[in-house]
Amino acid sequence: MLRSFRLGNHRSFRDEQELLLMPARPGDARRAVPVAAIYGANASGKSNLLNGLWYMQTAVLETVGGIGGSEGFRLDDGDEERSSSYVVELVAEGNRYTYGFVVRGEIVEQEWLYSYPEKRRRVLLERTGEHIKFGSTVPDLKAKLTVLDGLIQPDALVLGICKRLSLEPLMPVYEWFKAGMRIHYRHAENATDPLGQRVAAFLRRSPDHSRRLLGLLVAADVGITDISIENIGEPIRQPHASMTLQQVRRPGPGQARLKFRHGASGVPFDLVDESAGTLNWLDLLPEVLDVLDAGRLFVVDEIDGSLHPRLTAKLIELFQSTETNPHSAQLIFTTHDTSLLGTMLGGDLLDRDQVWFVEKGADGASELYPLTDFKPRKDQNTERRYLAGSYGAVPVLGDFAEAVAER
């Protein structure tokens, strides 16, 4: 469960920002809100915000080979490389933690991990450059400092090797990065993991998975009445030129092919025959069901891509309801769909503390701020006010006719 995320000097976020601050409001029994929506104009920095989370996860899990360079704010004046900071506040195994690090290029300048038993801060790890120390409350870790001196390189994180060294007090946070967060980019291309193979693998894991995934396809009214899996050994016909790369990827010999039955007669369709909206819905479903079952964080870029607003709203409702989300999974997403700010389902889909905006200033630096900064009234039309520019984070459009006119 993610409570907050901060980053500074990462690509478009020049100065340190308090990002995605998601503790529930006073009086709410939840430790954090289940959903956070991020709005903003094109190229405002929404995806870069999610990229910061992705970089942090990658740096922890792949630290043995070096964390890789952190690309700082590219529009800074001067050639001096600036440091970038990344911090998350999260709940793992029922305990609250703050973990963060500061990097300059590929060098780790600082790293720290704190826990908060009984609401008091406990130091687990503090690092400055190559100097590492563990808190007094974890004396068993101090005996391993000499081993760490030989293993920790300037471009490696201590958290990334805690499993190898059995640094047990650090493990809940490491496991959160490993299994507690899923980041989903729409149309992400991965030749070794095509959509059909991922869905087939999910269906084969359990009959219950097949039942639930098919149920969500049927409920979405995309025309699918059944799914079957076939093993194939022959090449597939050539795709037509208008297909996207994600649509044309087909199983190779010995792999699985999905067949989607449509209509009362069960006419079979291949994956490439399905619409872009159906493919995007199908792409989300296995991860949605997994994170709901395990109580994980699901981060989605452009959640509304090719989906009808009512379908996107129903997906959000799965996370908002304790009946469908009993394990406190979370959903963070970027979107341009302003109808989600309204009352399209007979009530407010998103609470006021679940809506965030990203706006890019004249210097190219992005700022992220919550709807609650504007102290909106319960009865006001948030969608209309946002589109009218009351909250910022909308494009300032020029004269399109003049732009295309012949001179």
Image (cartoon, rainbow, N blue to C red):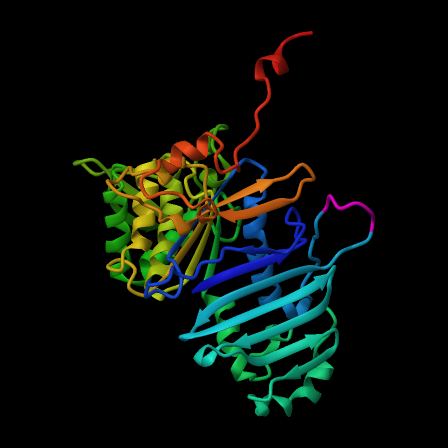
On the image, the x and y values in percent for residue 399 come to 59, 17
On the image, the x and y values in percent for residue 21 come to 49, 58
Residue 79 vs 41, above or below: the answer is below
At 35% from the left and 64% from the top, the residue drawn is 30
Q: Can the viewer see residue 191 in this picture? A: yes
Image check: 267 left or right of 372? left
Please tell me which residue lies in front, 120 or 77.
120
Residue that extends furthest to the left in the rendered view of this protein:
264
On the image, the x and y values in percent for residue 168 come to 52, 83
On the image, the x and y values in percent for residue 331 come to 40, 54
Give residue 86's quadrant in the image.
Answer: bottom right
State which quarter of the image contains the N terminus.
bottom left
Q: Can the viewer see residue 254 in this picture? A: no
Residue 326 vs 141, above or below: the answer is above
Residue that extends furthest to the top in the rendered view of this protein:
407
At 49% from the left and 32% from the top, the residue drawn is 389
| Residue 76 inside the magenta-drawn segment | yes
State which quarter of the image contains the C terminus.
top right
At 71% from the left and 88% from the top, the residue drawn is 146
Residue 373 vs 157, above or below: the answer is above
Residue 112 vs 224, above or below: the answer is below
| Residue 326 inside the magenta-drawn segment | no
Please tell me which residue lies in front, 37 or 307.
37
Q: Main secondary structure of the magenta part?
A: loop
Image check: 153 left or right of 287? right
Please tell me which residue lies in front, 380 or 72.
380
Q: Which residues are magenta?
A: 74-79
